[in-house]
Amino acid sequence: MNAVLQLNQPSQKAKASFLSETISDYGVEAILSELIEFVLAEYPDQLHCAVLSAYLIPAKNYVAVLNNRENFRLEMNHPNFINVEMNNG
């Protein structure tokens, strides 16, 4: 019986860690936005600026889509998760 209880504990820890961190917690989208603004404002060569932007802008959009999907899943599967984050943040 103890072996069964011990096997269930890691899965419960994995669920808790999954719910405690989301993509938006890492600030990837905000960092990409700042990097895009920096490249557009400070980079003197327009060709290199265009090439960098061609990679950074789709990456930012992709992260935003992932973040929205993750938030939607959390709202559907764990409705109280978003409310707790708003109250704590």
Image (spheres, rainbow, N blue to C red):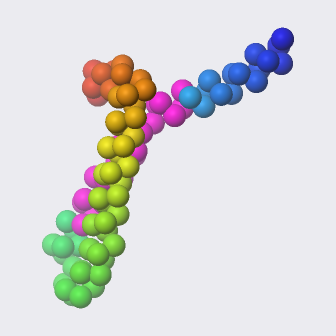
Q: Which residue is drawn at 27% across and 85% down?
A: 48
Q: Main secondary structure of the magenta part?
A: helix
Query: Residue 65: x and y, percent?
Result: 33, 51
Residue 58 visible in the shown view: yes
Relative depth, front residue between 69 and 50: 69
Q: Which residue is drawn at 15% across and 72% down?
A: 41
Q: Which residue is drawn at 51% across and 34% down?
A: 18
When the figure is inspected, residue 23 is found, relative to residue 88, above or below; the finding is below
Query: Which quadrant does the C terminus fall into?
Result: top left
Instruction: Tell me the quarter of the image containing the N terminus.
Output: top right
> Which contiguous range is marked in magenta?
16-36
Relative to 6, residue 46 above or below: below
Q: Residue furthest front?
A: 76
Mark count: 0
Q: Where is residue 70 in the image (x, y as percent from the top left)?
A: 39, 40
Task: Give the image quarter of residue 40.
Answer: bottom left
Whether residue 48 is situated above or below residue 69 in the rendered picture: below
As drawn, 76 above or below 61: above
Quadrant hosting residue 36: bottom left
Residue 25 seen anywhere in this rendered image of the structure: no
